[in-house]
């Protein structure tokens, strides 16, 4: 998108800094750092610290916990795009003798495989990975807690399996694959499996007194793909830009978009969901995608509003207290409300790209007595939407062989086709066997069950 400005307005920057300052104070965090991305570029950074003159900068590492899962999911999607696996493959096809080989890769990515949330005791986040050197130690004797594929149940062991899957198919460690396939191409030089100075120390803040103590920093080893990484505001802002747009060096835009499609609903108020490695949140009328993260001593969040071209990253070094998820959402909201995205100028299609046969299909169509309007876009896709009242709106992508495939809603995956008469004229539209005609219950053989020969009548 082309805009007439790059920097945020001073009033917007002041509002962002105020939100971070309140978060550090009310969350009682030793330090709090945040950044905002607009149209793929980092446009703001701010931080606060309990030590005067020592606030973290955009290059200071914090531990990011489960944001690590997004990186692991990208590695798996790369394997899929290269044809080395299918998301519907059972795990057993690629990783033998796990004891849960019937679960699919898609179910592991979306946390619907029915696996336990955590590994067996002792608490894995506060103990060294040497305590559980093998997958059997991570999964335990009863790895399943729910029927496979039935419900969303967040699982750290599930992402441990995905990390081992990456290692099995790549023939290198998860960390090596991560560095070569994501970190280096995207220039995330300050994202590492082990802390590299300058980095924040992790602390637990006493819930009833203004005192704190250091938290241990463990090497999670085999469970690293579920939550090992350290990163910075600067690196995560660059990663957020990738999650909004994709990058052919890492993962195509279409595959990143696929990760954002809900794979399983999350229990709760209906505002949250989960895609393929990405958390989904509907808040304040906008959709946010990304992930939260926590490990002893640290909490983190990355949210992207694709529609508004905005993203926010929040990092804090306290075990609990700082509401990084809420603050990240607020940072997106502050910029969106203060400086709303400028729409691209409307332009007509170049004359050479106008398809008059497709143009003739636009306008009103009727499914029975329900009125719909059909619109076309520059990529030969179409949108079918109700003209009044309620109805099933859907967008469709053009297929190379003709017709369209549904992209969302009730008609996702369904085929829309033009049905022609023997003379080549258009008879009707067929959408998954539903017939759309130019007139409500148009006479002829198109409407299933036929149309009363006497036609429309009054009382």
Image (cartoon, helix red, strand yellow):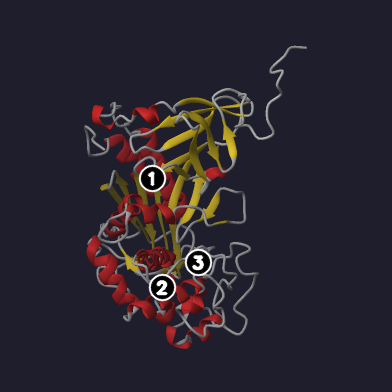
| Whether residue 216 can be seen here | no
Task: Name the image quarter holding residue 403.
Answer: top left
Q: CA distance from mark 2 to mark 1?
A: 26 Å
Furthest toward the top, the residue is: 458
**Dot 1 alpha-carbon crowd within 10 angstroms: few under 14, some 14 to 19, many 20 or more:** some
Report the residue marked by disc 3.
Answer: 88
- The residue shown at (43%, 36%) is 382
Contact between marks 2 and 1 (CB within 8 A): the answer is: no
Residue 430 in the image: above or below residue 442:
below
Task: Of the two numbered discs 2 and 1 on the same chain, state the one appearing first in sequence.
Answer: 2
SS type, badge 1: loop
Residue in front for this viewpoint, 360 or 4: 360
Residue in front for this viewpoint, 51 or 105: 105
Report the residue marked by disc 1.
Answer: 306
Residue 417 in the image: above or below residue 89:
above
**Dot 2 alpha-carbon crowd within 10 angstroms: few under 14, some 14 to 19, many 20 or more:** many
Screen quadrant of the N terminus: top left
Residue in front for this viewpoint, 457 or 325: 457
444 relative to 204 in the view: left or right = right
């Amino acid at each position: 998108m082309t805009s007439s400005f790059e920097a945020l307005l001073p009033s917007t920057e002041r509002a962002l800094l105020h939100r971070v300052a309140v978060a550090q104070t009310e969350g009682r965090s030793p330090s709090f750092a945040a950044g905002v991305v607009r149209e793929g570029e980092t446009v703001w950074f701010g931080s606060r610290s309990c030590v005067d003159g020592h606030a973290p900068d955009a290059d200071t590492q914090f531990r990011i916990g489960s944001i690590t899962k997004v990186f692991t999911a990208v590695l798996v999607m790369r394997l899929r795009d290269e044809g080395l696996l299918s998301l519907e493959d059972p795990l057993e096809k690629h990783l033998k003798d796990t004891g849960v080989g019937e679960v699919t890769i898609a179910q592991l990515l979306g946390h619907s495989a029915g696996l336990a949330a955590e590994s067996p005791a002792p608490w894995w986040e506060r103990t060294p990975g040497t305590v559980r050197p093998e997958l059997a130690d991570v999964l335990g004797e009863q790895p399943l807690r729910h029927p496979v594929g039935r419900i969303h149940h967040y699982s750290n062991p599930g992402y441990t399996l995905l990390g081992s899957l990456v290692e099995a198919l790549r023939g290198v460690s998860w960390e090596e694959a991560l560095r070569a396939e994501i970190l280096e191409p995207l220039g995330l030089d300050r994202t590492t499996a082990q802390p590299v100075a300058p980095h924040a120390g992790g602390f637990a803040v006493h819930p009833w007194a203004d005192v704190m103590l250091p938290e241990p920093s463990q090497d999670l080893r085999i469970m690293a793909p579920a939550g090992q990484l350290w990163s910075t505001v600067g690196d995560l802002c660059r990663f957020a830009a990738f999650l909004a747009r994709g990058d052919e060096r890492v993962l195509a835009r279409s595959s990143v978009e696929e990760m954002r499609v809900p794979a399983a609903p999350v229990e709760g108020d209906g505002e949250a969901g989960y895609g393929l490695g990405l958390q989904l949140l509907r808040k304040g009328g906008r959709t946010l995608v990304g992930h939260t993260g926590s490990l002893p001593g640290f909490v983190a969040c990355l949210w992207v509003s694709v529609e508004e071209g905005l993203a926010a990253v929040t990092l804090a070094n306290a075990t609990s207290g700082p509401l990084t998820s809420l603050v990240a959402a607020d940072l997106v909201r502050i910029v969106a409300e203060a400086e709303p995205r400028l729409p691209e100028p409307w332009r007509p299609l170049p004359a050479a790209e106008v398809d008059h046969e497709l143009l003739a299909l636009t306008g009103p169509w009727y499914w029975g007595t329900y009125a719909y309007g059909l619109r076309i876009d520059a990529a030969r896709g179409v949108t079918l939407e109700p003209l009044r009242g309620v109805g099933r709106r859907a967008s469709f992508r053009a297929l190379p062989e003709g017709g369209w495939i549904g992209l969302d809603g009730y008609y996702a995956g369904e085929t829309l086709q033009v049905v022609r008469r023997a003379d080549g004229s258009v008879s009707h539209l067929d959408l998954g066997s539903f017939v759309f005609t130019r007139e409500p219950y148009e006479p002829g053989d198109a409407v299933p069950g036929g149309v009363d020969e006497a036609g429309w009548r009054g009382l």
